[in-house]
Amino acid sequence: MIGHLQKEGMIMTPEPDLADVLIVNTCSFIDVAKEESVQTIVEAVNSRQEDPAREKQKIIVAGCLSQRFNVSKNEDERLPGLLPEVDAFIGLDQVTQVAPIVRKVLDRPLGDESLDAVTAKPRFIPDYTTPRFRLTPGHMAYVKIAEGCNHTCSFCIIPTIRGQHRSRTQESVVREAESLVQAGVKELNLISQDTTYFGMDRWEGRGRRAKPTSGVDSSRGESLASLLRDLNGIEGDFWVRLLYTHPAHWSDELIETIATCEKVANYVDIPLQHISDHMLDTMNRKTDGRYIRDLLGRMRQGIPDLAIRTTFITGFPGETSEDHDELLEFIRSFQFERCGIFSYSREEGTRAHEFGSHLHHMTIKARHRALTSAIDLVAGSVNEKQVGQTRKVLVEEEGIARSEWDAPDIDGRIFVPTDLPVGEFAEVRITDHRGYDLIAAMA
């Protein structure tokens, strides 16, 4: 979005009080994000009203909050009626139109009815030619390889907001990656709502079309495996990190590809959500406990020195004490290198919202506490085994680095000598650990 504004010659400012048009980009994945988005909008409106220098400022609300509620069939939920002080609302498909919308808003008299540009069923796909303004440090970048999701997990609102899965072309992703590496980027983080489904939506021909549980298969068309192989062929010293994979689409080809591509980090983010068959079925995850255990075993066997990151949901409607105990034992026994736990969030518009077996909040809190304690113990054990090992790390800031096992913002840190250059790789030896973090010296 910022890239499109710059392309049109508009000047960006990080200072809200200096802007002629203030764009609030929002999220509405879970209630906490939705509340934060609404609070930010209200603060912007109040600041404009209280500051005479900003009385002519226009406010545009963009992103998932607009997309989710402006196409609602319930008129009482639509944002123009709930937030009439906002000058315009744009959704996911208006990214390329943001500059003309800004001009249109600037030309409208103050107090005019809100401009609602949101369209239903998003179809926008980011491309190499889409201007981008990076907000990440110069040594790392996120690369969105697809948009939307075809899964219908009962707890998730994402398909409603972001639409069906739409992959970029492999060429587009590779060209963007090449330009980022040439600009000095050392870490490419591949993201989408389901990275493992990359290319599958474009498989065509009899017997080739993907199903909800189809595995990554380059013989049927472009796939995550073929993309990783092409990225691995780019010249330069960098690594590629794979985030947000879905267990239903993993295949032996994908495992082999990660194992043989030296620039692909030995790190896999694979949100499992639960291990109980009862819960996986209720969540509509298209997998069961036996499948998950077998897959994880094949991943560890096939990819040397692999770190598996996962997340689970506790307190989902209908979760029994037996379901909880099975998950707790699974976390203790499998020893995930990286693991997180979320308390179930009841989201309007999801099937789970209508379930009649919601748990008491104190039960959810107690289960979350028990699972967190188990994860803490596992993390300590995993980190203890790291002591004495030599690791290649990417220095994030003075005295702080990450290894292949650590994704930005969500995993642990490695405290390193402060004289190591920021934004560069280094070899260090792990000497100690503190909680989720490691301490290292020069190798």
Image: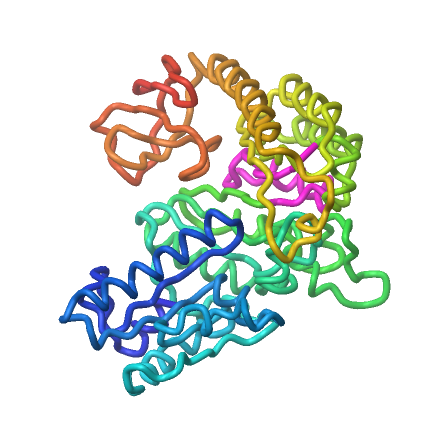
Q: Residue at x 63, y 31 (%)?
A: 303
The answer to whether 400 is drawn above or below residue 95 in the figure is above
Quadrant where the C terminus lies?
top left
Relative to 258, 140 lies left or right: left
Q: Residue at x 66, y 54 (%)?
A: 350
Colour setting = rainbow
Residue furthest left in the image: 53
| Whole-percent x, y for residue 308 in the image | 58, 31
The answer to whether 232 is drawn above or below residue 159 in the figure is above
| Whole-percent x, y for residue 427 in the image | 36, 26
Q: Who is closer to the viewer here, 332 or 28? A: 28
Q: Who is closer to the viewer here, 159 or 400? A: 159
Residue 426 quadrant: top left
Total count of labels: 0
**Is residue 260 highlighted in magenta?**
yes
Quadrant where the N terminus lies?
bottom left
| Whole-percent x, y for residue 152 in the image | 71, 54
Stretch in magenta: 245-274
Q: Residue at x 20, y 74 (%)?
A: 55
Residue furthest right in the image: 206
Q: Residue at x 64, y 42 (%)?
A: 257
Relative to 52, 349 lies left or right: right
**Is residue 432 highlighted in magenta?**
no
